[in-house]
Amino acid sequence: MKKKLLSYVKEIILFIVVMTLLANILSLYKSSDLPKSALTLVNIKLIDNKSYALNNKPLLVHFWATWCPTCKLEASNIQMLSKHYEVLTIAVKSGSDADIKQYLKENDLDFNVINDSSGFISSEFNIAAFPTTFIYDKEKNLVFSEVGYTSTLGLWLRMLWASF
């Protein structure tokens, strides 16, 4: 019995390692078409009608959608990070400002959101899948880009790296 249980545990660990590797390879492949240039967003207006000014800190820019199940899974990771780092999220084709505010309220989220209702901003960033995350250093040079789910620890380590 103990030997069989140990065998199952080894298989589960191997499965997790293989799936993690495949997910990272897929993310690397999908992110190859993303822009590598410095961030040039200007005149940023959030859904609460406040203006958002870029500052001299590392910044995480996160493209997501209310209709995206993976985005919903990752939202708590983005929320946690937003309490310690600069985070700017862009809700793509997710309805009106009121719709997005309701979604945030229902899911206990309060990070900064731009409503990209037409998909213009996401097309400028060549976004093809959600969620997609960019991490910029304090000079707004791209340090990392990710397509798909990223853990809180993964995001935290990338933001820490961007801080140096």
Image (spheres, helix red, strand yellow):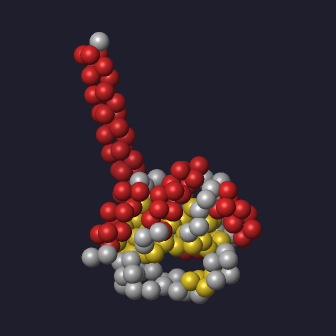
Question: In the rendered picture of this protein, how many numbered marks are placed on residues?
Answer: 0
Q: Is residue 101 above or below residue 16?
A: below
**Residue 31 makes an appearance in the image:** no
Q: Residue at x 72, y 70 (%)?
A: 97
Q: Name which quarter of the figure residue 117 lies in.
A: bottom right
**What x and y, as percent, mark residue 101?**
69, 66
Is 84 rendered above or below residue 53? above
Q: Tell me which corner region of the image, top left, top right, bottom left or bottom right, holds residue 30.
A: bottom left
* Residue 32 image-quadrant placement: bottom left
Residue 10 located left or right of residue 101: left
Nearer to me, 53 or 128: 53
Q: Quadrant of the C terminus?
A: bottom left
In the image, what residue occupies the spot 31% across and 75% down? Answer: 163
Q: Is residue 113 visible?
A: yes
* Residue sitting at the far left: 3
Residue 13: x and y in percent read 31, 34
Residue 127, x across and y down, in percent: 53, 64
Q: Residue at x 42, y 70 (%)?
A: 84
In the rendered image of this protein, does residue 53 appear above or below residue 101?
below
- Please, is residue 86 above or below residue 146 in the view? below
Figure quadrant of the N terminus: top left
Task: Give the side of residue 33 with respect to residue 64, left or right.
Answer: left
**Left or right: 84, with 9 as reference point:** right
Name which residue lies at 34% across and 34% down. Answer: 15
Taking the image as shown, residue 49 lies to the left or right of residue 88, namely right
Q: Position of residue 111 (x, y in %)?
A: 56, 69
